[in-house]
Amino acid sequence: MSERPSRAADDRRMLLVEDDPEQARMLAELFTQEGYRVDVALDAQQGLHLALDRVHRILVVDRGLPAADGLELVGRLRRVGVTARILVLTALGGAPDRVAGLDAGADDYLAKPFDLDELLARVRALVRRHLDEAEVLAVGAGELDVARREVRLPGGRQVPLSGRECELLRLLASHPRTVHSRRDLRGRLFAGTSADSLVDTYVYHLRRKLGREVVRTVHGLGYRLGAL
């Protein structure tokens, strides 16, 4: 069994979404030299997949991506509950463009051409903010560490979750007395699909990992947080 990365190692994980292969290589090398563990995506679809599949403390996203604008990617990640800090890189540096980036869910916005030392300083600042605001939610007698995507159980056992498992449990744990309809959960977690069965599938995954009582079914209405 492979050893789970330590918290310190996870805190240095970054996703870089940049469609220019040469620029992506240069920036990945720069961040790696600074001690970050860098995943690289060359388009928005790959970026979405990696952001949902792995734990990142920070995302650096180029706005001018092919097929889907970088701000579309940022907006979609925020809608499904991704909490990593996001820095957008762009050739569009006007005030309206910065406002659009921040409104889409970015935490910072840096116009090209940019100074590499300033880029690194902004990334360091965002990583500090993320660590200062780490989110831990109660789930019965255990707790959900959102940033690490894991549930810590009494006795010290840790149960890792996938990105969407974590976001579903986070939503339920954030509003423990609320009954959420399948339609509401699907809209917030699986934007772009009309299949409510996806919600049932991820409820099944959580119950398989954490026990049947972790998510309660309220017949005719939907789901709510249960207990461990």
Image (cartoon, rainbow, N blue to C red):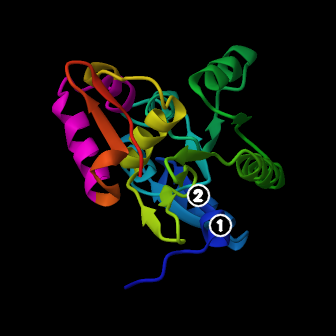
Give the residue displayed 69% in from the left and 14% down from the top.
96
Q: Say if 93 sits above or below 65 in the image.
A: above
Rounded to the nearest whole Å, what is the CA distance between mark 2 and mark 1? 6 Å
Q: Is residue 172 visible?
A: yes
Residue 139 is marked as none
Residue 14 is marked as 2
**Label 2: element kind:** strand
Q: Earlier in the sequence, mark 2 or mark 1?
A: 2
Q: Say if 185 sits above or below 83 in the image.
A: above
Amino acid under disc 1: Tyr
Q: Say if 180 sits above or below 32 in the image.
A: above
How many C-alpha atoms fall within 10 Å of the one at disc 1: few (<14), some, or many (≥20)?
many
Q: Please give the residue where the numbered disc 1 appears in the rendered image.
A: 36
Residue 199, picture quadrant: top left
Residue 6 counted in the magenta span: no
Q: Is residue 130 left or right of residue 23?
A: right
Give whichever of 158, 68 is nearer the camera: 158
Amino acid under disc 2: Met
Residue 196 counted in the magenta span: yes
Count of numbered labels shown in the rendering: 2
- The boundaries of the magenta stretch are 185-208
Q: Name the spot of residue 63 as percent of width and height, x first.
A: 55, 34
Give the residue displayed 50% in from the left and 48% down from the top.
17
Q: Name the spot of residue 182 as percent of width and height, x first.
A: 26, 24
Q: Is residue 46 visible?
A: no
Q: Say if 2 sits above or below 192 in the image.
A: below
How many C-alpha atoms fall within 10 Å of the one at disc 2: few (<14), some, or many (≥20)?
many
Give the residue displayed 73% in from the left and 19% down from the top.
94
Give whichever of 157, 41 is nearer the camera: 157
Are the residues flagged by discs 2 and 1 in contact, CB closer than 8 Å? yes
Q: Name the spot of residue 211 as percent of width and height, x first.
A: 31, 55
